[in-house]
Amino acid sequence: MASRSYGQYCGVTTAVELIGERWALLIVRDLLVGPRRYTDLKQGLPKIPTNILSTRLKELQEGGVVRRVALANCGLVYELTPYGRGLESIVLALGRWGFPQMGEPAPEDVVTGDSLTMALRTAFRPEVAASVPPADYEVHVGDVALRVQVDGAELRIAQLAPPAPPVGGRLPTGQPELVFAAGPGIRRVISGELTPAEAIDREVLAVVAGDPSLLERFADTFHIEATVDVAA
Amino acid sequence: MASRSYGQYCGVTTAVELIGERWALLIVRDLLVGPRRYTDLKQGLPKIPTNILSTRLKELQEGGVVRRVALANCGLVYELTPYGRGLESIVLALGRWGFPQMGEPAPEDVVTGDSLTMALRTAFRPEVAASVPPADYEVHVGDVALRVQVDGAELRIAQLAPPAPPVGGRLPTGQPELVFAAGPGIRRVISGELTPAEAIDREVLAVVAGDPSLLERFADTFHIEATVDVAA
DNA sequence: CCGGATCCGAATCGATACTG
DNA sequence: CAGTATCGATTCGGATCCGG
């Protein structure tokens, strides 16, 4: 198996050997949201072949990144080890780095609960959040629904649909202050390319319930600069 | 080419599509040290097939990560765009993350000038460096030789050998205060597994010139924790 | 349904040779 | 120096199948 090796004694090389195979980092991304069953992962990564998923999970376990845990109530989940959780800041940084190059969504592109959760974590600005009142949103993108609670510099996200209450997840009680629905165009709100008002105007986004002015706060709290530096 | 797509509209996915192919991030790692010619890259990545190198360079250019520049004195180099330079902190973090899992070097593993340069940047602790006197080292690992200058929180590294003065690089003048030579075992000094004294004892490292006590300062300035958290 | 294993054609990668 | 061309070895993708 020396053919898989890059032949260098270097930390970056080792890291890439551990999580650089196709699909591996996307599995890690989803596991950063919480422990997941094999089937959850398959659904969250609709285009992954099942043999690749099982191969990657094996490799990630051998690398000490992921572990397989039998649940008390007879189930089986994969979760990140503490070492694997060390990738969190890296995956968030990669999401921020990739954001400006996302372009327009391909017709086939989907938005999953886990990917949207991580995207919001990526875009979250704690300094801004700490300086505005707490807020409680329900965000719909495609058929994904998230409950997003901002309380000071803290962010909590729960998946409402589709369908299953996440393993070990506790659903928030009470009513969100703002419910809104969008498509992939929500990215242009996050980037500041569209103001919330413009987004509503162009039907990129629609308020279902609550005070639309809360959208401004949302856009302030979740933001990623998308201008790509072309010059020198 | 939709077969290469992961089918998700997500920043992490986009990032992985840009720099997730085999060898791509190692090319970026080397370019983070400085602009490099095709041949430099090939030497710095001894095991990369040349067709893969040229394919990757094309893809990285299309992705806006790398650009190809004709030099004044008739040459051709690849360099990171400003957008590509945005990967610096990510690559450094990956190097730090991979460090604990490096294990023992395979017999075939090499250490290149660029990989060692990035490894030292990864291990550099500016807070520590700022609190000790400036230092000027010459580090040999295998047949790589680096001039490493620490001045307050600033770090400057130049490659002395092998062989070519790097493109646009200016060699430091004057004498280093300490010259030492090591093998891959230098990693165990960086991790703190061996003290400099122990490293000399076990012939992992040898002082060629200068005051051996400066090694302590080196080990303080360049350090990565290598203990992997196994518990919960 | 859950958690995979198996099979096979298509695409990529790796090694070497070759060229302007 | 800066790549193309070629070709066998691997890996990936898509579909199917199987035991609990």
Image (spheres, coloured by chain):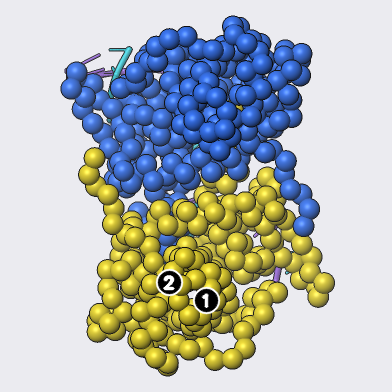
Chain colours: A blue, B yellow, C cyan, D purple
Q: Name the residue under label 1.
A: B150
Q: Quadrant of the C terminus of chain A?
A: bottom right
Q: Residue at x 33, y 38 (%)?
A: A80
Residue B6 in view of the camera: no
Q: Which of A167 and B17 is in front in this view?
A: A167
In percent of width and height, residue A76 lies at 25, 25
Q: Determine the residue located farthest toward the right in the rendered image.
A: B72
Q: Nearer the viewer, residue D4 or A41?
A: A41
Above or below: residue B186 compared with residue A157:
below
Above or below: residue B38 compared with residue A215:
below
10 Å crowding of disc 2: few (<14), some (14-19), many (20+) = many
Let me know if marks 1 and 2 both belong to one chain. Answer: yes
Q: Name the residue under label 2.
A: B221
Chain letter of mark 2 equals: B
Badge 1 vs badge 2, beta-carbon distance below 8 Å: yes
Amino acid type indicated by mark 1: Val
Q: Give the quadrant of residue A65.
A: top left
